Amino acid sequence: MSIGIIVMGLLIGFLVGLTGVGGAALLTPILILLGISPSIAVGTDLVYNSITKLFGTFQHWRQKTINFKLVKYLAIGSIPSAICSVGILQLFETFFHNQEQVIKHTLGYVLILVALATLIKTFMENKVEWNYFQKKPMHEKRGLTICVGAILGFIVGLTSIGSGSLFALVMIYLYRLSPSKLVGTDIAHAFLLVSAAGMMHAGIGNVDYPLMFNLLMGSIPGVILGSTLSPKLPSKPLKTIMAIMILISGFKLI
């Protein structure tokens, strides 16, 4: 089982490095389809993501490709919202004993949303013209940014999915960011968000640590290998295939 999980982590890490498509959207449904309970899959994935995002954040901080003001505004909304969503899950379990069903079905719908967001981002990111929101200065979009953070943070707390793909899509349409700053800001905010949500899940016992360490053993070399090969392979077809895989996973979980 450990060797199988390491190989799975290697494969997922490789695909993430190759395409940039979020690992949570691939990993969480696979864990559930393998028979791991939805709550453990979500909690483990959040803590696993926190560790991987830490390395990415450090690298982008060194490269000065993080918009810290945008990270702050997003986090003001997303972190309390993600913590709240984990608390609501516990209430559902206490009063209705249906936490696993709530997570599984929500996950299915969010995966479909993420797949569509990935396709839009893949085919439209270079065709976006400056719109009304992008032209406004950052301080005028403070309230909007916090609201966006709150809505998407709630989704991430419930499902572990969307900390990269959904936030990245919103940032493309609402803010003027260079490609490198878009990626760096997205990763830095995602690190804060998944760390907060992961700690909440860890606190209520929703993290399988041996599973997480086995996944990390495979995914870290996988990401390095995928990132190395990424410039040599066409990205659009690969991202499209990944989005279709995520879409199918979503329909399987509904």
Image (cartoon, rainbow, N blue to C red):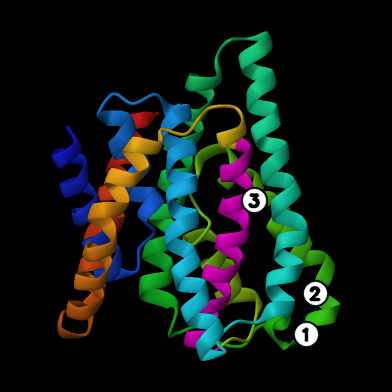
**Which residue has dot 3 on it?**
153
Q: Residue at x 59, y 73 (%)?
A: 171
Considering only order in the chain, which callout, 2 or 3, is on the residue closer to the N terminus? 2
Mark nearer the viewer, 3 or 2: 3
Residue under label 1: 136
Task: Give the alpha-carbon distance from disc 3 to disc 2, as whole Å.
Answer: 18 Å
Give the Cα separation between the discs numbered 1 and 2.
7 Å
- How packed is label 3: few (under 14 Cα within 10 Å), some, or many (20 or more)? many
Task: Give the answer, above or below, for where 108 lies relative to 182.
Answer: above
Task: Tell me if I can see residue 250 in this picture.
Answer: no
Element at label 1:
loop
Query: Residue 4's spot in the image, x, y percent?
Result: 15, 39
Tell me the kind of residue under disc 2: Lys
Q: Judge left or right: residue 1 versus residue 212.
A: left
> Callout 2: helix, strand or loop?
helix
Where does label 2 land, which residue?
A: 141
Q: Residue 244: horizontal and vertical position, in percent?
A: 27, 52
> Neighbour class for label 1 at 10 Å: few (<14), some, many (≥20)?
few
Is 210 left, or right, of 234 in this rendering?
right
On screen, residue 163 above or below 214: below
State the residue at coordinates (62%, 55%): 193
Question: Which percent across, then down, holds residue 60?
Answer: 50, 81
For the residue carrying disc 2, how many other residues have a C-alpha within 10 Å: few (<14), some (14-19), or many (20+)? some
